[in-house]
């Protein structure tokens, strides 16, 4: 039976309420460790490195990971600090994409990254034909 707050007489009913209850039940030393661990993982750097290694734009990475492009941008720029579960899902989907794509696939299919083709740095021998 619901009490009008989303909880039941047997405890929290929504996944977020159950997670909050589990976190509250953790010993303080575990809570402190979890906070410290969360601050040492730099998701923005890891996500940007993986995306660039795969040669993906933010929009393409977002499509693959089933999230909004704005979320990829916010994560990479430190605007949001996603949960470990959310980052694991994003990274797993990008990893699946990397395993499934043909070896000859290049970033050209995704379009240029910001700065490419706009006088940005080029590798030697990559000058376009006249």
Image (cartoon, helix red, strand yellow):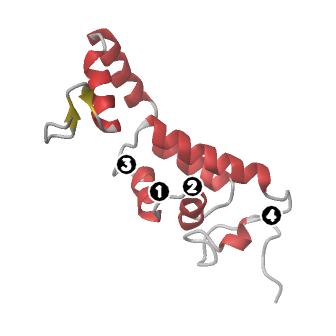
Tell me if residue 109 comes above or below residue 26 in the rendering. below
Q: Nearer the viewer, residue 92 or 129?
A: 92
Please give the name of the residue rendered at 25% of the width and 24% of the height, measured from the top-left corner.
10
Q: Are marks 3 and 2 in contact (CB under 8 Å)?
A: no
Q: Are marks 3 and 4 in contact (CB under 8 Å)?
A: no
Q: Earlier in the sequence, mark 3 or mark 2?
A: 2
Residue pointed to by mark 3:
78
- Residue beneath the point at 60% across and 71% down: 120
Q: Pick whichever, 42 or 98, lies toward us.
A: 98
Q: CA distance from mark 2 to mark 1?
A: 9 Å
Compared to residue 112, the image places residue 14 above or below, namely above
Cβ–Cβ under 8 Å for marks 1 and 4: no
**Residue, disc 1:** 72
The residue that mark 2 highlights is: 65
Callout 4 crowding tier (Cα within 10 Å): few <14, some 14–19, many ≥20: few
Residue in the picture at 79% in, 65% down: 124
Provide residue 122's location: percent of width, then percent of height.
Answer: 70, 68
- Return the disc, 1 or 4, that comes first in the chain's sequence: 1
Q: Earlier in the sequence, mark 3 or mark 4?
A: 3
Residue 69's place in the image compared with 12, above or below, is below
Q: Are marks 2 and 1 in contact (CB under 8 Å)?
A: yes
- Distance (Cα) linking label 3 and label 4: 30 Å
Q: Quadrant of the C terminus?
A: bottom right
Q: Horizontal placement of 20 versus 109: left or right?
A: left
Circle 3 crowding by C-alpha within 10 Å: few under 14, some 14–19, many from 20: some
Vertical order, 79 against 8 (above or below):
below
């Amino acid at each position: 039976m619901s009490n009008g707050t989303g909880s039941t007489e047997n405890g929290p009913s929504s996944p977020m309420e159950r997670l909050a209850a589990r976190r509250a039940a953790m010993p303080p030393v575990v809570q402190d460790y979890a906070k410290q661990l969360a601050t040492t993982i730099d998701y923005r750097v890891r996500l940007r490195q993986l995306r660039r290694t795969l040669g993906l734009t933010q929009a393409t990475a977002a499509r693959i990971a089933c999230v909004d492009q704005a979320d990829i941008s916010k994560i990479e720029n430190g605007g949001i600090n996603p949960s470990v579960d959310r980052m694991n899902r994003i990274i797993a989907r990008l990893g699946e994409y990397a395993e499934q794509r043909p070896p000859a696939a290049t970033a050209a299919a995704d379009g240029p990254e910001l700065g490419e083709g706009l006088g940005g740095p080029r590798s030697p021998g990559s000058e376009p034909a006249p």
